[in-house]
Image (cartoon, helix red, strand yellow):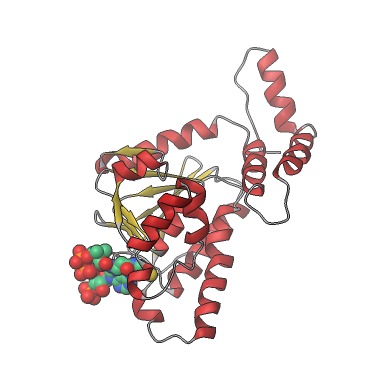
């Protein structure tokens, strides 16, 4: 499938999605959000992809936010619709994807850009990256899950301060607070993420998808994460991956998982 604002490259079961509007610092407009939705949906359906890496085009920005030009004239109802639709088709969609999604944060990740990185399963930053939720400086608040996911990742007090000051943190500060898992030189960012993806791909895709579901359950209203874990744990026993993983261990060989 071909897209206007994103690039999708697949190699050895790893798909790399690059948000590609460098002249607008990869700002998320409606078309880009829709295209990202379609690309993620397609990759999830196509069982060949085992890990997705999401990054931004150019050396300056991952994503510098939602496209301010697009929503500057919106009404209250349109504002509600913008946040609801975006959360539904992209941010929550990515968080709940069955295949792991790594955000390779290659520069500015601001507003909707940081929110998108936070919706990914974990984040790796290049050493030049800067992250923040500057929405209150525009008279609005984060609307793509930022008020929820930032406190989950770095704690309530730090999130309050970052959102209230509209300030940016460096990659090293983000690492210290747990917002990103690793900081690497920009030139090595994708190679590093590929290395992490290789480690993930040694393991059962089915078990990984159930782990994602169980971890996410802790943050969902009305769901009991421990119960979700018990059910998902039990389901694993009925899979070929479980039989293969345990048999391979006992036969002292590497497991060849099929995701079934
Ligand atoms: N929405 C729409 N356009 C954006 C954008 C956004 N969130 N962020 C950057 N752009 C556009 C700029 O308007 C500019 O376009 P132009 O060349 O047609 O005028 C282009 O990207 C380059 O940005 P510029 O501001 O000139 O780069 P800079 O290096 O001087 O500053 C930033 C970089 C990231 C500090 C600055 O672009 C910025 O503050 N962006 C907005 C961040 C933000 O508030 N995001 C939250 C949105 S809810």
Residue 150 in the image: x percent, y percent? Answer: 46, 53
For this view, does 49 lie left or right of residue 248?
A: left
Q: Quadrant of ligand 1?
A: bottom left
11 and 205: which one is in front?
205
Pick the front one: 198 or 10? 198
Q: Residue at x 55, y 42 (%)?
A: 50
Task: Tell how many labels.
Answer: 0
Q: Can residue 224 be seen from the camera position used here?
A: yes
Vertical side of 195 occupied by 17: above or below: below
Left or right? Give the position of 18 relative to 43: left
Q: Residue at x 67, y 39 (%)?
A: 206
Q: Measuring from the top left, give residue 254's x and y in whole percent.
A: 59, 20
Q: Residue 229 appears at what percent x and percent y?
A: 72, 39
Residue 210 lies in quadrant: top right
Horizontal side, residue 210 vs residue 7: left or right: right
User: Compared with residue 48, is residue 133 higher up or lower down, i.e. above or below?
Assistant: below
Say which of 3 and 116 sits in front. 116
Rendering quarter of residue 5: bottom left
Q: Residue at x 63, y 24 (%)?
A: 255
* Residue closer to the observer: 48 or 124: 124
x 62%, y 54%: residue: 45
Q: Is residue 52 visible?
A: no
Side of 62 where 76 appears, left or right: right
Quarter of the picture containing the C terminus is top right
| Percent coordinates x, y for residue 259 in the rendering | 66, 38
């Amino acid at each position: 499938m071909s897209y206007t604002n994103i690039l999708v490259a697949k190699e050895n079961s790893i798909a790399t999605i690059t948000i590609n509007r460098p002249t607008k610092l990869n700002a998320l407009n409606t078309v880009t959000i829709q295209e990202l939705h379609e690309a993620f949906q397609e990759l999830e359906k196509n069982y060949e992809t085992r890990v997705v890496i999401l990054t931004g085009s150019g050396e300056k920005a991952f994503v510098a936010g939602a496209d301010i030009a697009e929503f500057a004239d919106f009404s209250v109802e349109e504002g509600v619709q913008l946040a609801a639709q975006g959360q539904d088709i992209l941010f929550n969609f990515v968080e709940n994807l069955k295949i792991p999604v790594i955000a390779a944060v290659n520069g500015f990740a601001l507003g909707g850009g940081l929110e998108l990185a936070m919706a990914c399963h974990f984040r790796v930053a290049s050493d030049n990256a800067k992250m923040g939720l500057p929405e209150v400086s525009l008279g609005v608040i984060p609307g793509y899950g930022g008020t929820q996911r930032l406190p989950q990742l770095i704690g309530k007090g730090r999130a309050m301060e970052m959102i209230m000051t509209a300030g940016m943190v460096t990659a090293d500060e983000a690492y210290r607070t747990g917002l990103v898992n690793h900081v690497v030189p920009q030139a090595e960012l994708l190679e590093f993420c590929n290395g992490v993806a290789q480690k993930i791909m040694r393991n059962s895709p089915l078990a990984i998808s159930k782990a994602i579901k169980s971890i996410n359950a802790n943050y969902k209203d009305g769901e009991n994460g421990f119960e979700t874990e018990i059910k998902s744990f039990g389901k694993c026993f009925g899979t070929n991956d479980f039989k293969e993983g345990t048999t391979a261990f006992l036969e002292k060989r590497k497991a060849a998982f099929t995701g079934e």
